[in-house]
Image (tube, coloured by chain):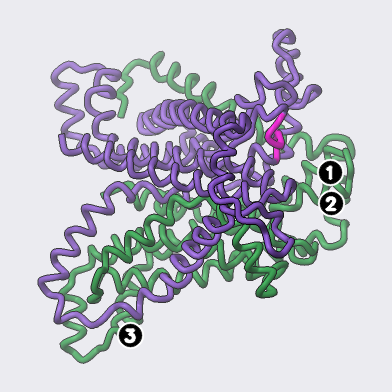
Chain colours: A purple, B green
Amino acid sequence: MTGTSTPTLHRAASVSDEADGGGRRRGPRRPPGLPWILPALVLSVGLIYYGIGYTGYISTLNWDGISPGPEHVGAHNYTRMLHDPVFWAAVRHTALFFVLTFVVQTLVGLTFAVLMHSKLKLAAIYKVIVFVPVVLAPAIMAPVFRHMFAPDGELNAVLRHIGLGDLAQPWIGQTSTALPVIMFITIWEWTGVTFVLYYAAMTQIDPSVLEAARIDGAGNLRTLRSIIWPELRGTTVALAMLGAIGALKTFDVPYLVTIGGPNYATEFLGTYIYRQTIPLSHVGYGAALSIVLLVVALLMALALQFAGREREGR
Amino acid sequence: MFEIRSRTGRIFLQIFATVLLIPFAFPLVVMVKGAFAGEGLGNFQAVLRVPGFGRFFVNSLIIAAAVIVLVYVVTMMAAFGFAKLHIRFREVYFWLLLACLTLPEVVLLAPLFATDTKLGLYDTYWAVILPLAALQVPFAVLLTRNFINSLPDELFEAARVDGANSYRGFIYLVIPLTRPIGAAVLIFTLVAAWNDYLFPLVFLQSPDLQTITLVPQFFVGEFSNDQTKILASAVITAIPEIVAYLSLQRLFERGLSAGAIK
């Protein structure tokens, strides 16, 4: 669940700045800490930066992953990307996927959070149903979704049953609906996180502010727009970052539900890298794609962090 | 948040919430209904009779436990070091670690595959445990460091004046005081390790070592196109996760929002 990382990420800088100032003043009196952080650095920074460095090296090779003495091709793998329609399709899918899943999750998660704060009956059960998908492994749910969206599956059965049989279609098997299916599954999986974070953030809002707004005659929707929503900005920025990185990491669902198809309609950067690296044994090209993916992920995280901080400063 | 005074308003809100809930409940209903279709409980018996089915659970358990222990120990030490001890260029190390948060695991496939085969780690638990732990540590450290930062410095200084060295400070102050955030770290790591699919898919070849996330594929081979058996296996593998969530619900939600609340 690395995805859940981001809530604190956008504040990390300010927290560590404070600590740094304090630390420097008292610095000499504190015992040395390097040995304490060393195991974490060796494990994480060591393994991950070693992997990235190695990937960077492989990305300059024309290599199948096994044969000795691979040929050095310089930046060829990178220039090849520019003319690779599947790569650009994967980029487009990832961008569209991020925007749509983020918007829907935010709307639905926010709605649930507000509703659960409004003395709803059976709220405890509703909460469990929204959150359970978060803990279920996508790999385990994949066959369920394949079954549900199959031509003779449950969704079409329900549509026919309620007289909407005209809408029944092979959801996974056609290019026009395959990507929306992947988005639906992702929204199903992750709205629980959005909901829980908004729910928690709303408990931090001072009730007297809401009371004051109400006395001033603000209705429910007005209160939501003018008071609650602005208070949640920090959480929203964190969730945007979580969603962006999550979109770039997307692999399990498209790989298992649609295998990136039909006709590459659900190819993502993650699935494309896997396809190039493992089944096609284009390890060099896969590595070059990986490096591009990593750079995009870092830039996204930085951009969203700056966007978030600028707004907070205002 | 919302104040609904009228009865109709409350009823409307209840209906609205229920309708919104249908897409969330539907896949779960499909899963359970499909698992009981045809032979009913017989589907479950057939799945449980498959030799080696229990092995997947044992493997997931071993891997998750190892990842949790590794992440917990390494994280607590590092968070303590970052928050309360003297480190030159501390923030440089910290940002090196934070940058790892954005790393998609697929980036590590090729280098780890090449290295694992060279070191003989390929097709062992370690090939999955080490990268999983490495990817969990940065977030765990971020969370725990923030938590330890909020503990008063005086506490640690007093211990030092009383003659306690860093090691004793760690065992007698950090470990007990960080219990709430430790629980959150534990939960995140458990979910991440238990649900991971890509690393076991690539690095574990022998069926003896494979994890529960590979079960559906295993059963697609085993029962070819008998959907009901495959869905029954999905239900069986989902049960421990749902039970774990329901019994630790508080912890899950608190852990998740630990980062969001100031």
Q: Amino acid at mark 3?
A: Tyr
What is the secondary structure assignment of the residue under circle 1? helix
- Closer to viewer: mark 1 or mark 3: 3
B82 lies above or below A5: below
Label located before the other in sequence (3 or 2): 2
Cβ atoms at labels 2 and 1 below 8 Å apart:
yes
- Snapshot quadrant of residue A150: top right
Label located before the other in sequence (1 or 3): 3
Asked if one can make out residue B242 in the rendered structure from this viewpoint, the answer is: no
The residue closer to the viewer here, A87 or B53, is A87
Q: Which residue is mark 2?
A: B47
Q: Is B173 left or right of B65, judged from the image as shown? A: left
Q: Kindly identify the residue that appears in the image at 23 percent across and 41 percent down.
A: A309
Q: Chain of mark 3?
A: B
Q: Is B156 left or right of A97, judged from the image as shown? A: left
- Snapshot quadrant of residue A26: bottom left
The residue closer to the viewer here, A100 or B1, is A100
